[in-house]
Amino acid sequence: MAVRVGVLGATGAVGQRLIELLDPHPDFEIAALTASEDSAGEPYRTAAKWRLNTPIPDDVATMTVGATEPGSIPDDVDLLFSSLPSSVGARVEPDFCEAGYVVSSNSSNARMAADVPLVIPEVNADHLDLLEVQRDERGWDGALVKNPNCSTITFVPTLAALAEAGYRLERVHVATLQAVSGAGYDGVSSMEIIDNAIPHIGSEEEKLETESRRLLGEFDGAEIRENEVEVAASCNRIPTIDGHLENVWVEAADDLSPEDAAAAMREYPSLDLRSSPDPLIRVFDDPDRPQPRLDRTLGDGMAISAGGLRESTFGLQYNCLAHNTVRGAAGASVLNGELLLENGYL
Amino acid sequence: MAVRVGVLGATGAVGQRLIELLDPHPDFEIAALTASEDSAGEPYRTAAKWRLNTPIPDDVATMTVGATEPGSIPDDVDLLFSSLPSSVGARVEPDFCEAGYVVSSNSSNARMAADVPLVIPEVNADHLDLLEVQRDERGWDGALVKNPNCSTITFVPTLAALAEAGYRLERVHVATLQAVSGAGYDGVSSMEIIDNAIPHIGSEEEKLETESRRLLGEFDGAEIRENEVEVAASCNRIPTIDGHLENVWVEAADDLSPEDAAAAMREYPSLDLRSSPDPLIRVFDDPDRPQPRLDRTLGDGMAISAGGLRESTFGLQYNCLAHNTVRGAAGASVLNGELLLENGYL
Amino acid sequence: MAVRVGVLGATGAVGQRLIELLDPHPDFEIAALTASEDSAGEPYRTAAKWRLNTPIPDDVATMTVGATEPGSIPDDVDLLFSSLPSSVGARVEPDFCEAGYVVSSNSSNARMAADVPLVIPEVNADHLDLLEVQRDERGWDGALVKNPNCSTITFVPTLAALAEAGYRLERVHVATLQAVSGAGYDGVSSMEIIDNAIPHIGSEEEKLETESRRLLGEFDGAEIRENEVEVAASCNRIPTIDGHLENVWVEAADDLSPEDAAAAMREYPSLDLRSSPDPLIRVFDDPDRPQPRLDRTLGDGMAISAGGLRESTFGLQYNCLAHNTVRGAAGASVLNGELLLENGYL
Amino acid sequence: MAVRVGVLGATGAVGQRLIELLDPHPDFEIAALTASEDSAGEPYRTAAKWRLNTPIPDDVATMTVGATEPGSIPDDVDLLFSSLPSSVGARVEPDFCEAGYVVSSNSSNARMAADVPLVIPEVNADHLDLLEVQRDERGWDGALVKNPNCSTITFVPTLAALAEAGYRLERVHVATLQAVSGAGYDGVSSMEIIDNAIPHIGSEEEKLETESRRLLGEFDGAEIRENEVEVAASCNRIPTIDGHLENVWVEAADDLSPEDAAAAMREYPSLDLRSSPDPLIRVFDDPDRPQPRLDRTLGDGMAISAGGLRESTFGLQYNCLAHNTVRGAAGASVLNGELLLENGYL
């Protein structure tokens, strides 16, 4: 039987992707939608300005949107997917956990909190056990799990593959070319970005630099010990709709050839979860791939793609890409939901 | 009296910019235009598909385009600006020099040749003296001077400013977001680049890595001794018309704060040449500048702009930008022409 | 058993779409690929620069591309899909028909020839009977069937729906906003179209004006009698990848309200062919739909969408849209192939 | 001596263009800036997020922005340029006129009011005399003059040229391809328009249809008698930054050849006002011009360009273009200011 789920912040860009992914999902059944006060009480069809190129699911379209508070959620709902603005998430997510709901959240609040698992299932599924610590400390019946920022999710699996293959990573430089959908429907005005690029996304660089160390870290039963790799990020917004492309330089303690790196990425295991693609990382031989428009939908938008592996002046150099609102946001939360289900938290 | 000049490869994207810059130039007078065989004999108006948003100059429009060979150039022409495809440049530029013409070339051939000055006047004007070596070795009456690649020109002045302020540069990472005009009018098809980015530009990374060391090097009277800074580049094409944006990380032997770096860039001197802007480098305080569409025309397209100076995990981090077909190509060649004139080579 | 088919001009933008559509098609099996001399003898993977966001089918990738001449086609192939440049099509298509092949062609040559059926199956399937006249006159064992131009296909079904509902159409104005893919992979350079629009596409307006009258005409057993509607077209290229959007004004002899027009379009029947979507025409109530990026993939790219039906100063006004390389080209040819199969021509 | 002027709504897209045009203007001196409550009291540099590619003028940057009410305007200011949202304009513009200010307004409110001159100086300067009626009726010391909507301004001069040459215009169809800047800085989100087009702009079509008849009408000393031409418009937003392109079909009572139409446009007189370009209409012979990116800056953004004049199925057909935030908005208001000055209203 499908787990009944709710979507917090269901009308935004990531909320719409969540609905697109959850509606046909065999393990989950959409039973509640929330949005801001303004939209509460409206049918989803009018509350959301649906802008995906798949049709709005009929059954969801007629659901009434509730306010974003525990009282709006039916009791038989077990799992909530959250794509709230971080300031709202910081305020209300603990209320839902307190009220007994398991929350798989894409919001950036609390991602680095000591007792909140920040998880990419294929990379650090074992961090989920931190929930025991969380429940001990907070006394929640529910639970709060986070997925990382979209730009973090894009490059961390490639680093994880190298680490898994035994390379000790020391220094990473990453420059991002990020799509406009990462900022939400009204995040980037057309006058700002057509025939242009913006070399700044607020707080984004810090997210790549800190979340990556946590994701690659180890859970020792009590806390996450961060990986010691040092990361420097530079973030840019460019005129693409979907798909974050990243240039990565890696310096390892050991000799790391492009061929060995490609092999490590190709062999990096996927998981036996419904939304996890196999292989997880598609490695291109062509030096000009991956490209956002051509490769963002690989693995139904859940694959990481990599290419252009070459020797750099300082070590290894390559490019990687992921669909920022699927693998990098809505799909990441859904995948964490699948992991929670698999691990008996629902 | 104005020096009579010719333009080799006058119909392409850079050729058109050359004509736009040279036509009103008080020191130069356009007296000859060449193009490929196909166009030779045609009036410029029909030979060139003019695509700038300034009108084609009337007097140039009616000039007849000649073949790209010394015999097409009137004897009273002294200086040739070359924006030929590099394979053509490699073949014919020596012929023009042999025939006595001074050639200021934007073509990529021979840029790293030991006896060819590769010059950004504000950065290494003294490298021009290498022409004495060139004439000795080649026996030319003419001379060959090169400007660097557009993506090299964008970041080297910022490094030169740091070096000039006394910082010893050790390691530089640079990621480029390059405009489509850098590939010429037909270089990038719209289907390749709309809603997309391409993380590969053939040979471009090597140009940034090698040309930068030469430009920052020293001429010891006999040869150029390259600077010891190590550079790693990653190049991307994005959907902008003009203006290359670059993310730069710099590690210096000495402590280098963002404030000191900004001061060094602001104080870096310009030259008293007509096309050299003052200041050479415009430093923005806003973290989201420079941006291609907003800042590429600063200083009539000849300024370098920089911004987002901040402490990086590994040293200093910032962004810089230049207009790739003006400062990065046609304007660079014209500026070298002005330097040649100032130094008595014409 | 699947009909064995070949693709003439298999490496171009429409050729790639043909392969994407034909590879999984249960009625057809790709057995031959041709391209220009340059590519003949190469495996398809290297001959075609594959640029779709679906992967190149493995079995097709390893096929050897042949020259575009009857001798390259195995004897057991019955049906050829042609997306040749029109000058090539004009030269070689008759040879293939002479040699006994049935050709479903997207090329613009011979579309208005008196004995060549120009067919959109849902609109004028009965025109296929013109093949009897064709065979009589030309003595071919094979046959030549054409689909119309992409911009014609976009608006004609909406007119057909109005005509089918009994309205006598008198005057039509249509302005098109056409995607770059309509010109092929290298048809529109990025420098021409980013931040721009081009109000001219060679010969395109004439195609809309003449093909529409033929498609809406009647086959009297001997020839096609053109519909008497007068059409004036104005064609523009805009910076979209796929999807032609058209603004249409219709003046009918009879009173034609937006509501009645919407009903006529909604009720216009589809066909029981595999690639024909049901409904054929999706009518939006929102005034700002259809939009290329949101609606071009409706019905797997084979639906026509319409919206913004409103009273005009002069009659009826609305907008319509179709995916230009699917419904407007490759899918149109495949659909004609299905019609040929259904009607016993294979 | 320069007239002291104020800008109402100085921080928006049109407000910024007004400042760019007024700052160097010899007849006007910027003496007051207003914006919404939120910005009142701030220096202009922080109140406006300046996004033009010309630098913000230093003297304007340090001016303090006032609230949009008569009390914020110094007494020695005579002329106000208004680019307020229409709902705000409707509320406050009469207050300023009542208080004695002459207002040259780009806001859409009151454009069709019987006693408000709607003026394009080169087309209907004599409509300015309607101000006598306005003052009689309203008892204002000040005055209110409007310029039309940007999309109206683009095509009306071409119609006026035909009318001036003696052609009686009967029916006009116009389809617009409008730039995003027409909706203001935050009017069109990037997710709405990249790789897309939107066939709907609220109320825009009605503006073209009604304003054009008024502009081409005659002032009989008491009221404007509208021209009898019937106009049908279809409006689209496309991914261009600046420049509205329009496809026009004209049916006249008389025979109207493309050649005669071109001659009429070329000969249509400009005015001896500082911002009026000469010629007013640039007519291209190339069928693929005008194009937004190439031609919007002709005549410093104040020229109308036309091209593609050809025989249509129903009469004459052509394309025209104007810079929507210069000729179509800020420049239009400035030009009306110049006309007011010339006519002794200041």
Image (cartoon, coloured by chain):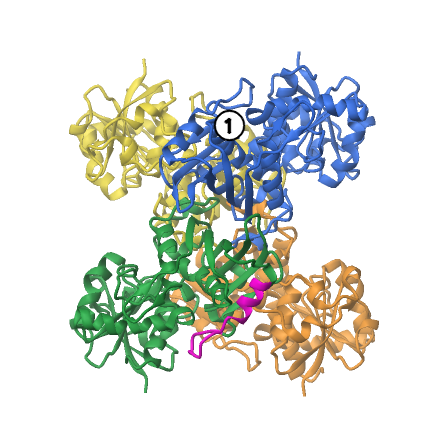
Chain colours: A green, B blue, C orange, D yellow
- At which x and y percent is residue B187? 64, 47
Q: Is residue B107 left or right of residue D144?
A: right
Left or right, residue C210 beside residue A123:
right
* Chain ID of residue with mark 1: B
- Residue A270 on the magenta span: yes
Q: Which residue is mark 1?
A: B300
Q: Is residue D91 left or right of residue C36?
A: left
The quarter of the rendered structure image containing the C terminus of chain A is bottom left
Classify mark 1: residues with Cα within 10 Å, few (<14), some (14-19) or many (20+).
some
Q: Residue furthest front?
A: A254
> Which quadrant: the N terminus of chain A?
bottom left
Q: Which residues are magenta?
A: A260-277
Q: Three-letter amino acid code at disc 1?
A: Asp
Position above or below: C70 against D170:
below
Query: Along the line of sight, which residue is nearer the eye, B10 or A259?
Result: A259
Vertical arrangement, residue B125 with respect to residue C199, above or below: above
Query: Against A137, is D145 above or below?
Result: above
Task: Give how far across and how far down residue C346 sits, in percent.
Answer: 72, 83
Between A1 and C334, which is closer to the camera in this rendering? A1
Report the residue that reaches farthest toward the top: B1
Residue C137 location (% of width, % of height): 81, 73
Residue A268 shown in magenta: yes
Q: Is residue B275 above or below residue C140?
A: above
Q: Position of residue A287 (x, y in %)?
A: 61, 57
| Residue at horizontal 52 percent and vertical 43 percent from the top | D253
Identify the residue shown where x is 27% and y is 69%: A222
Which residue is at the front of the view, B64 or D85? B64
At 38% from the left edge and 78% from the top edge, which residue is drawn? A25
